[in-house]
Image (spheres, rainbow, N blue to C red):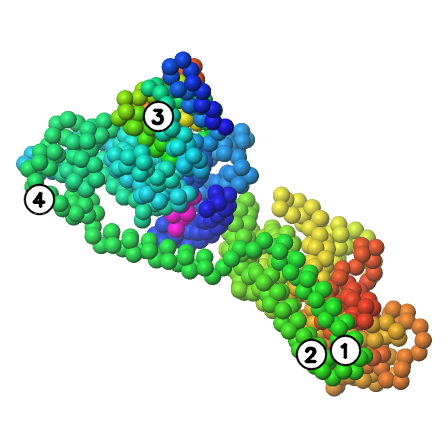
Amino acid sequence: MNQTSEASDAFRVCIEGEFTIYRAAELKAELLDALQRAVAIELDLTNVSELDSAGVQLLLLLKRQATAQGVVTRIVGQSPAVSEVFALANLSGYLGEIAGPVAGENQK
Amino acid sequence: MNLDNIVRGFVAESRELLDGMERDLLAAESATLDAETLNSIFRAAHTIKGGAGLFGLPHVVAFTHLVESVLDALRDGRATLDSELVALLLSCRDFIGLLIDSAEAGEVSPKEEQAQVGRELLEQLRAYLPTLAEPGSEPPTPAAESPSIVAGDPLLAPIASNHWHISLRFGPDVLRGGMDPLSFIRYLSSLGTISGIVTVFDQMPSAEQMDPESCYLGFEIALSSEADKTTLESVFDFVRDSSSIRILPPNSRIAEFTKLIAELPEAADRLGEILQRCGTLTERELDAALAVQQAELPIARPLGEILIQRGSVHPEVVEAALAKQQLVIDHGRSQENRTIRVDSDKLDRLINLVGELIISAASTEVVARRARMPELQACTATLSHLVEEVRDSALQLRMVKIGSTFNRFQRVVHDVSRATGKDIALVVNGEETELDKTVVEQLGDPLLHLVRNAMDHGIESGELREQRGKPTRGTVKLNAFHDSGNIVIEVSDDGGGLRCDKIRAKAVERGLIEATAELSENEIFSLIFEPGFSTAEQVTDLSGRGVGMDVVKRNITALRGSVSIASQEGIGTTVTVRLPLTLAIINGFLVGLGNAVFVLPLDVIEECVELSAEPAHDYTNLRGQLLPFIRLRELFGIEGTPGPRQNIVIVKHGATRAGLVVDTLLGEFQTVIKPLNKMFNQVKCINGSSILGSGEVALILDVPTLVRQAAQVSTNN
């Protein structure tokens, strides 16, 4: 399941499995909780198997909330499923280019 | 909602649409193509494409899209439907069916050999498409309109960008309804290229109030696509009610964007920025649009009005389209409410249980009679009456119309006509006739063979028909009707008919009959059902390998049916198949022979009379007519002497009647048919067994065989 671990100064949120409506309530709580813990959040989406609109909304919510609170968010890894959605809805620009090694270049 | 169910629904719907498409294509070929049929074909392709898009089957979308383009060309009169094209479209239909089959099996991409077939078909389809490049086929391009209007009012100027602009705001319940807005975007991207997209979530409330299961998303999309407006609108059929969807055609006027901006919930500046980011509006166009906004000019003209002003849509067309759509939806709903799909295994189980129920009701009745309690007997009488009704309605559930089986042959006839170069029409009658589902399923192959035979051997070539003074177009007829508990299916053709001498010669050559044997015409005809018999001068792909009619006969006999043939040389041949309506339960009539009890199907019994013949004779005088009969005692070798009064049960099969001599008549009985073990396959005159109320086993008599035997005996005498 989801692992949250504190690296040096950034708080890392690692979401695994489905990032969809089925887990939206649970993940919303988790993401908002993360916002209270650190001034920087690293989102690891390397092991997300599926991302739907509900998941996208939560990412957008996190980003908006983080910006309002002055918290920096960064996506440090994304699975092909995530890359596909980001490319489809053109979200990479807003949510932040990934800094991790997993590239989404194989997407159209 | 369960996704599996939706996919299954899609598969089932697609199959129905494909069947409809096949019917329409065949109808279109045989008659002149009317707009209604063409539209119906187009709609079928279009709906499948739409569904496939939603379920992530891009290869189906891609393939269907090209089919649709060709159909569109037909609709616009840029191509004509000849038999070549019908054949091609039929192959395409089959291919789509294949793709749907593999989609059902869970394959999201085509197999290599499928892809190969697909490419070949696409290649052929493209041959019809160069004409598409002509003007008029492009999506509406108002740029072609006279530029003089544009000069005056900047609002009426078309924008420079030549892609569709789609503005989506999904309703809050879309996610809960099981739909994912992203899937619509995915589908759109299969219809064209999304050149710009901005995700809008300005309506999302603050973190505390945001419900993670509500949808707050919107999209502004610039799409370059060849699709027409209806196609694009139909993408959003599932969410049209709950969401707001605005689709602006390429090169729309700036005024329409002004209106769009006014209607959307977000602030004008923000929207302007979004539209610019999509690449839909240039900065100058945006300024023009916003300038009007700020000046608060009365620009709130309804979109429809603008469209009408532009001359692109007529109000009547819009209204008619809406009314029609509503009708389709209503019709679909009422149909849905009236029928349910049930697993046929469940039905089989029900029938089995009803069978057991009948047996145990019968034994209860026996016990009640023995107990001599009038009250109990009254109860069991009511009970057995109810059981009878339950049986009838349970069997009714399994009854299906034969029409769909018949209509499958339209395609066969079409294909064979092409393959053999004969012009053949199929005429179908009695499609409404119902029979047991199991029977229908097992009837397909034998009927297919009979139809093919009729076309291949029956119908002569066009020249020969002309020589014989017949119309060049041959006819194959399929007819079905009910006749005393049986269903009768006739396959007839107006071809050359069977040639008695030829069949006879062949039968002698094959050692089936003696050269000197005296046979009636009917007996000679029935020789063609013997194994290893074929008189076709030429072995073709279709039939003539001598493994045809005997298999047909075997299959039909296995269904407790019979097959006969009538023919007139030069005029045609009719093959008649008689089948019992159901395989499971019949109304039976019990007769006694010594200690044994036998069952006769009640439907075949005409009457019962007392035996009044001389002991040596095997026929009697029934109201002035000669009636041959069979002494069942002798036939089954039952020992002992019969009682003083024997009876004749007169049974009828087809047009022939015969008597069966029995000891006693025991009355009606609900008979649950239990098939005999394979060991008894060779036993003649018996075709099943049943369990009586007393627990005894009764054998069911095979009436067709008995009647035939009696008729043979009488002719030999």
Q: Which circle marks residue B298 in the picture?
A: 4
- Cα separation between marks 2 and 1: 9 Å
Pointers 2 and 1 within a single chain: yes
Instruction: Say which residue label 1 marks.
Output: B368
Give the residue number, with chain letter if any, for mark 3: A36
**Which tag is nearer the camera, tag 4 or tag 2?**
2
Question: Which secondary structure, mark 3?
Answer: loop
Q: Nearer the viewer, residue B111 or B264?
A: B264
Question: Could you give the CA–CA distance between mark 1 and mark 3, rounded to whole angstroms?
Answer: 82 Å
User: Which amino acid, mark 4?
Assistant: Pro
Q: What kind of residue is marked 2?
A: Cys
Q: Quadrant of the C terminus of chain B?
A: bottom right
Badge 1 crowding class, 10 Å Cα cut-off, few under 14, some 14 to 19, many 20 or more, is: some
Q: Is residue B258 left or right of residue B57?
A: left
Rendered residue at 19%/39% (across/down): B260
Specify few, some or many for label 3: CA neighbours under 10 Å numbering under 14, 14-19, or 20 or more. Answer: few
Kindly identify which numbered label has been placed on residue B415.
Answer: none
Question: Percent position (x, y) of residue B702?
Answer: 77, 66
Crowdedness near tag 2: few (<14), some (14–19) or many (≥20) residues, C-alpha within 10 Å: few
Q: Chain of mark 1?
A: B
Q: Earlier in the sequence, mark 2 or mark 1?
A: 1
Q: Can you tell which mark lies on residue B379?
A: 2
- Give the spatial CA distance, label 3 vs label 4: 49 Å
Q: Are marks 2 and 3 on the same chain?
A: no
